[in-house]
Image: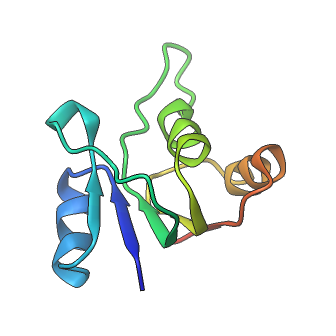
Amino acid sequence: MRVLIIGYGIVGKNMAKIFPEADLCDPPQGLQQKPVVHDVAFICVPTPPREDGSCDTSVVEKAVRENQACVFCIKSTVPPGTTGRIARETGKACVFSP
């Protein structure tokens, strides 16, 4: 199984312990994704608050759009309904797993 971990912070590093053979992607840390289709991609990126207090999900959305996987498993904190919206907008299979 080909696994991709997007985001190599606290959550991403712990996912890498579970999947030590996973490909890693975290451009700010110099980790670039390989151009292959993965079976599953775990999204472990930050979702900081905006000025109005709402959750900024733009990094999560970008991760889904810019990568190829059979299933995207969102580990990042997102508001209810975000996973379904991203799946509809991208046509990609997305699930949420806190």
The residue at 58%/48% (across/down) is: 64
Instruction: Give the percent coordinates (x, y) of residue 96.
Output: 58, 67
Whether 7 is drawn above or below 24: the answer is above
The residue at 57%/28% (across/down) is: 54
Specify how the rendered protein is coloured. rainbow
- Residue closer to the observer: 10 or 36: 36
Does 8 sit left or right of 49 as displayed? left
> Which corner quadrant of the image does residue 17 belong to?
bottom left
Instruction: Give the percent coordinates (x, y) of residue 25.
Output: 30, 50
Q: Total number of numbered labels?
A: 0
The residue at 17%/63% (across/down) is: 13
Instruction: Give the percent coordinates (x, y) of residue 92.
Output: 72, 58
> Which corner quadrant of the image does residue 52 belong to?
top right
- Residue closer to the observer: 40 or 33: 33
The residue at 22%/31% (across/down) is: 28
Whether 15 is drawn above or below 24: the answer is below
Instruction: Give the percent coordinates (x, y) of residue 44.
Output: 37, 54
Does 67 sit left or right of 92 as displayed? left
> Which corner quadrant of the image does residue 95 belong to?
bottom right
Does residue 76 appear in this view?
Answer: yes
Whether 8 is drawn above or below 26: the answer is below
Does residue 98 appear in this view?
Answer: no
Classify the position of the N terminus by image quarter: bottom left
- Residue positioned most to the front: 35
Whether 60 is drawn above or below 94: the answer is above
